[in-house]
Amino acid sequence: MNLIGDARYGKELSGDLWEGKRTLILIHAYRECDAAAQLELARILALPREQRTGGDVAWMRQLIDQRGSLDYAVAIARGLAGAALREFELIYADVPDSRDKAFIRGLVTWALERAS
């Protein structure tokens, strides 16, 4: 969600918050906050990007941090990656080791590292 600055991917810091994308992280933050914060989050997300302010984005980021939503999403991603690796091992158990097999297996950890 480009919430952690990393120039390697060339994405705008907090770009998904600026865009108002409904992600697992925002859904978790919404579920974990009180009714007043839910209303404020809904108000901000209803705004077009050009009307969303830096203060709005900072408020959403603070809500995410306070509610542990990044940690929640990382835990979900790790669980899914573990399940994917387990399925890979079951499906490809009889396939001889090769550079291609290692590449496919490595995609799981690559995707997880990229998202973290």
Image: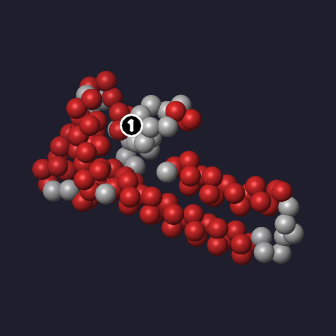
Q: Residue at x 20, y 56 (%)?
A: 33
Q: Residue at x 38, y 58 (%)?
A: 71
Residue 98 visible in the current orientation: yes
Q: Is residue 86 left or right of residue 15?
A: right
Q: What secondary structure is marked by label 1?
A: loop
Residue 42 visible in the current orientation: no
Q: Which x, y percent locates residue 79? A: 51, 67
Q: Which x, y percent locates residue 85? A: 64, 68
Q: Is residue 31 above or below residue 52?
A: below
Packing grade of label 1 (10 A; few <14, some 14-19, many >=20) is some
Q: Which x, y percent locates residue 41? A: 23, 44
Between 86 and 31, the one nearer to me in the picture: 86
* Residue situated furthest left in the rendering: 36
Count of marks placed on residues = 1
Q: Residue at x 82, y 56 (%)?
A: 100
Q: Which amino acid type is marked by label 1?
A: Ser
Query: To which quarter of the image does residue 81 belong?
Result: bottom right
Q: Is residue 52 above or below residue 29?
A: above
Q: Which x, y percent locates residue 51? A: 26, 25
Q: Is residue 52 above or below residue 116?
A: above
